[in-house]
Image: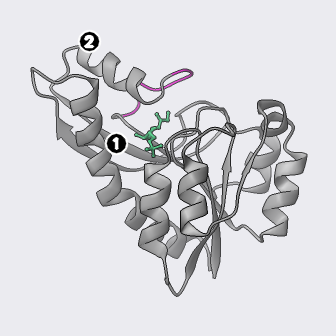
Amino acid sequence: MTRIAIIASGSGSNAENIAKYFKGHAEVHISLILSNNSDAYVHERAAKLGIPSFTFTKAEFDEGKEILEVLREYEIDFIVLAGFLLKISQPLLEAYAERIVNIHPALLPKYGGKGMYGDRVHQAVIDASETESGITIHYVNEHYDEGNIIFQAICKVEPDDNCETLAARVHALEYAHFPRVIEAVIKNSIH
Ligand code: GAR
């Protein structure tokens, strides 16, 4: 069994979608949800799904020690970032080398980097009059949004799109692809 921890800063709709996809799965278990925000709606989703969730401060994320202890306690093999704001620190990167993936709501390498999160990404895409956006699922390294790309999917940007309409289209792609890409990555990388 591969045990996954999902890390999320906000609403957690991807976290919920992933948890539902793997419910009752023979080989993958969503064991833990972590956040940097105690008010994040992801905690309510976690409670409803029966998944333990914890909050750590930015300093604790940077330092890594307590988070690694919790990850060990829950025997976590793999980490999924689903709407996480902060950079993953070196201790976590070392402990989970090639075992942390992130989803980004645009076509990297464009519209990534520090501060490029959620609606800020969609607004930048709209402001640049792009005709296409999409999702990027990638391994996480020490730089924001720069790890090796695993998968991308494209959607249209319509001329009358606003953040909300574009986000909805991108979220639909995330829900359709992220769980099965996680499943495929785990099948190939963890034996
Ligand atoms: C998702 O669209 C995800 O791609 C994005 O945040 C949203 C979280 O939504 N991630 C980033 O912007 C990372 N830079 P959710 O909390 O409803 O899953």
Name the amino acid, label 1. Ile
- Examine the structure image and report whether residue 110 is included in the region drawn in magenta: yes
Q: Which residue is mark 2?
A: 127
- Examine the structure image and report whether residue 56 is included in the region drawn in magenta: no
- The overriding secondary structure of the stretch rendered in magenta is loop
Q: Residue at x 9, y 20 (%)?
A: 159
Name the amino acid, label 2. Asp
Quadrant of the rendered image containing residue 189: bottom right
Question: On the picture, is 17 further left or further right than 165?
Answer: right
**Mark 1 vs mark 2: which is more N-terminal?**
2
Taking depth in this image into account, of 57 and 156 the one nearest to the observer is 57
User: Quick one: quadrant of the N terminus?
Assistant: bottom right
The kind of secondary structure element at disc 1 is strand
Q: Quadrant of ligand 1?
A: top left
The residues colored magenta run 108-115
Q: Which mark is residue 167?
A: none
Q: Which mark is residue 135?
A: 1
Q: Is residue 110 visible?
A: no
